[in-house]
Image: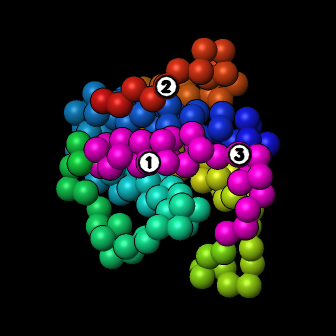
Amino acid sequence: MLAMIADLVRHKWHANATLLSAITHHELAAQDEELRTLFHHVLIANRYWLLLILQKEFARDEEARIPGTMDELIAKYRETETLEMEEWLSHCSEADMESAVQTPFLSGQSFSVAQAMMQVSMHSLGHRAQCASRLRSLGGTPPTTDFILWLKDRPAAEWP
């Protein structure tokens, strides 16, 4: 399970960075509040589950503030990728994947770390599709971010 989750996490960061790069290289999209807001939502969902797994505080009011620019948002993505890769994934074991996490937003339920990270990956994928569609509607060309194509070379995230 760990290998699959690790691949999904690495792909998620690559795909987020690739799409954000395409957005920042398109003038209209780079200024689009809807794209910035949606990518912020993806980020805080990722941060929520990651911080829950790491048993760190999620400062809801601070996290809810939408960065004023894409550059600020991308900086927060970079910071979160580093946290996830260095403080969590690099130390994670198969046994850690089965550890339970609980969220007050779904009281009475418990999820494995693997399930939580699957949620983050799938949630990101769904919203990236919305962002790609929005980029296209603004006249841009969304990049290819398919997981199966990523597997060939497994490139790391390259942030704009």
Task: Tell me residue 144's x, y (percent).
Answer: 54, 24
Q: Is residue 151 left or right of residue 32?
A: right
From mark 1 to mark 3, how far is it between C-alphas?
Answer: 17 Å
Q: What kind of residue is marked 2?
A: Ala
Q: Main secondary structure of the magenta part?
A: helix
SS at mark 3 in the image: loop
Q: Is residue 19 left or right of residue 50?
A: left
Question: Hey, which quadrant is residue 18 in on the image?
Answer: top left
Q: Nearer the viewer, residue 3 or 77?
A: 3
Instruction: Report whether residue 110 is seen.
Output: yes
Q: Quadrant of the N terminus?
A: top right
Question: Hey, which quadrant is residue 112 in on the image?
Answer: bottom right
Residue under circle 2?
A: 156
- Residue at x-position 20% and y-position 56%: 68
From mark 3 to mark 2, how far is it between C-alphas?
Answer: 21 Å
Which mark is on residue 93? Answer: 3
SS at mark 1 in the image: helix
SS at mark 2 in the image: loop
Q: Quadrant of the C terminus?
A: top left
The range drawn in magenta is 73-101
Mark 2 or mark 1, earlier in chain: 1
Task: Tell me residue 134's x, y (percent).
Answer: 43, 43
Q: Residue furthest bottom?
A: 108
Q: Counting other residues with Cα less than 10 Å from the Cα at mark 1, is it few (<14), some (14-19), or many (20 or more)?
A: some
Question: Hey, which quadrant is residue 147 in on the image?
Answer: top right
Residue under circle 1?
A: 83
Q: What kind of residue is marked 3?
A: Ser
- Residue at x-position 54% and y-position 61%: 54
